[in-house]
Image: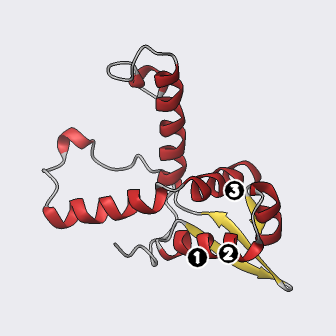
Amino acid sequence: MSRKNARPAESCCDRPSLTDRPLLTPIQAGDLAAVFKVLANDTRLRLLHALVRAGEMGVTDLAAAVGMTPQAVSNQLQRLSDLGILASRRDGNSIIYRLVDLCVMGLLDQGWCLMDEASGRTGVTGRAGTCCGD
């Protein structure tokens, strides 16, 4: 799924609800799986969370925040940029990254919610709505 040209969303929630949408086509399901595959990486999740917290950061600061080399961080940031999740700008010799896809921020928040619910040993089913914005 190529979202390189996607512009930043004002809100992730300006779309029909899942119950109002037609069933995913096989192609749409594959595209969605590709998004989740990119996000299903602990390093990328930590980088995204650092960017959410800071607003924007350079590669060197991100590398220090997650305890990795700048080259390794740069490789991960490129994967996120390729999907249109991040945008970058040059500041002298540095490249500064920021999150531009607000839906990803919502996914991080919902994922954290699900993790918190699961750690409460009460299960996720039926309770996520109380944590995740409903």
Residue 103 at x, y = what percent? 47, 52
Q: Is residue 50 above or below residue 17?
A: below
Q: Which residue is mark 1?
A: 78
The quadrant the N terminus occupies is bottom left
Other residues around mark 2 within 10 Å, as few (<14) / some (14–19) / many (≥20): some
Residue 93 at x, y = what percent? 85, 86
Identified by mark 2, the residue type is: Ser
Q: Which residue is mark 2?
A: 74
In the picture provided, is 55 more to the left or to the right than 79?
right
* Residue at (46% x, 24% y) in the render: 118
CB within 8 Å, label 2 to label 3 = no
Sooner in the amino-acid sequence: mark 1 or mark 3: 3
Mark 3: secondary structure: helix
Q: Quadrant of residue 2?
A: bottom left
Q: Is residue 72 above or below residue 41?
A: below
**Of discs 2 and 3, which sits in the foreground?**
2
* Residue found at the very far right of the displayed protein: 92
* Residue at (13% x, 50% y) in the render: 23
In the picture provided, is 48 more to the left or to the right than 115?
right
Number of marks in picture? 3
Q: Which residue is mark 3?
A: 51
Mark 1: secondary structure: helix
